[in-house]
Image: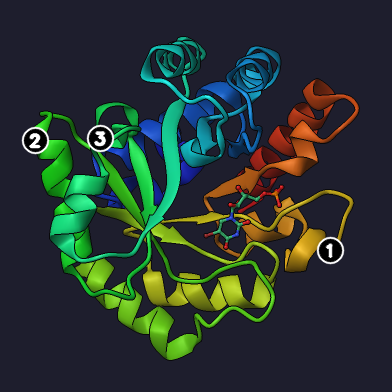
């Protein structure tokens, strides 16, 4: 299916090149799944990519949870994700002043050199986004930022006025590809979508086909409901990597999210 037909107004109105890249991949794979590869070893992540990479559009990582991290082995992860046609997305949740965020994009993990997308809090103000963009510029790469407008964890402090200020920061920067929304709540997502409009993506963690509650305060909603409420990508971790059959699970999340997009 052609991306502009599947995505409609979103395709026409999103300006960030990586949003189009994502929408194209989603159409190729008939899936809106972003895989949260929350595993502690490089071998485990490699195996997961091998197993489910054909059904997911992006690999979301937390590099700082990987034991014995080194750039050489990480390069293999990056390579195999790219070979499977996935975007690389480091869920770093930056939150410092711009200059420090720019420096943190380098360092041991050198996120700027391989990540296409990163998450950032907006709590420190708009300059954090400029710092992240400057870091990609330093290595002559283009990247996109997803600002946390909502979270899925219970009792989080990202209330409506904070969400609105976050959207203001996002509107002012071409580097902000979109926002993280709370996938566990259709009503919160509809509200967020109505404020965001068509020009930015909303990606949502907090989705699971079977569970309603995760460990330590994680909340879950149904992936199809999230997409129907305005989410453009469902971020799925344990629903896939903790499943007894990750391949079938990835297929189910793919078809549930893709079906909901076509319905939308
Ligand atoms: P789960 O296993 O599907 O619950 O994993 C969810 C992932 O999404 C995990 O990597 C979190 O770091 C990430 N996440 C989240 O769960 N909720 C949020 O509000 C944000 C990120 Br932001």
- The numbered mark, 2 or 1, whose residue comes first in the sequence reads 2
Residue at mark 2 to residue at mark 1: CA–CA distance = 41 Å
Report which residue position mark 2 lands on: 138
Which residue occupies 20% across, 66% down?
97
Q: Is mark 1 within 8 Å of ligand 1?
A: no
Of the numbered discs 3 and 1, the one sitting upstream in the chain is 3
Q: Secondary structure at mark 3?
A: helix
Q: What residue is pinned by disc 1? A: 213
> Measured from the top left, where is residue 214 in percent x and y?
81, 59
Determine which quarter of the picture holds residue 189. Answer: bottom right
Q: Secondary structure at mark 2?
A: helix
Give the CA separation, mark 3 to mark 1: 34 Å
In the displayed structure, 69 sits above or below 162; it is above
Residue 170 seen in the figure: yes
Mark 1 lies on a secondary structure that is loop
Going by the image, does 110 lie left or right of 82? left
Q: Are marks 2 and 1 in contact (CB under 8 Å)?
A: no
Q: Which mark is residue 112?
A: 3
- Examine the image and state in which quarter residue 138 appears: top left
Report the front residue among 26 and 103: 103
Instruction: Tell me if label 2 and label 3 are in contact, CB under 8 Å.
Output: yes
Q: Which mark is residue 133?
A: none
In the picture, the quarter occupied by the C terminus is bottom right
Tell me the residue at 40%/14% (across/down): 75
Closer to the camera in the image, 240 or 3: 240
């Amino acid at each position: 299916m052609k991306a502009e037909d599947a995505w409609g107004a979103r395709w026409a109105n999103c300006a960030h090149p990586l949003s189009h890249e994502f929408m194209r991949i989603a159409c190729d794979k008939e899936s809106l799944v972003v895989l949260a590869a929350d595993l502690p070893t490089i071998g485990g992540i490699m195996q997961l990519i091998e197993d489910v990479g054909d059904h997911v559009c992006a690999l979301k990582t937390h590099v700082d949870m990987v034991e014995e991290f080194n750039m050489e082995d990480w390069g293999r992860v990056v390579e195999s994700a790219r070979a499977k046609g996935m975007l690389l997305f480091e869920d770093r949740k930056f939150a410092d002043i711009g200059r420090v965020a720019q420096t943190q994009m380098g360092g041991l993990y050198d996120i700027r050199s391989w990540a296409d997308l990163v998450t950032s809090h907006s709590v420190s103000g708009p300059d954090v986004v400029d710092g992240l963009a400057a870091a990609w510029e330093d290595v002559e790469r283009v990247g996109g930022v997803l600002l946390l407008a909502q979270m899925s964890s219970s009792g989080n402090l990202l209330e409506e006025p904070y969400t609105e200020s976050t959207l203001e920061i996002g509107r002012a920067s071409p580097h902000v590809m979109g926002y993280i929304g709370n996938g566990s709540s259709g009503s919160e997502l509809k509200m967020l979508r109505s404020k965001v409009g068509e020009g930015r993506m909303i990606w949502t963690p907090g989705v699971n086909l079977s569970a309603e509650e995760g460990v330590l305060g994680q909340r879950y909603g149904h992936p199809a409901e999230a997409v129907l409420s305005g989410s453009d990508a469902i971020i799925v971790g344990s629903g896939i990597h903790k499943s007894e059959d990750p391949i079938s699970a990835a297929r189910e999340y793919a078809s549930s999210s893709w079906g909901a997009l076509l319905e939308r």
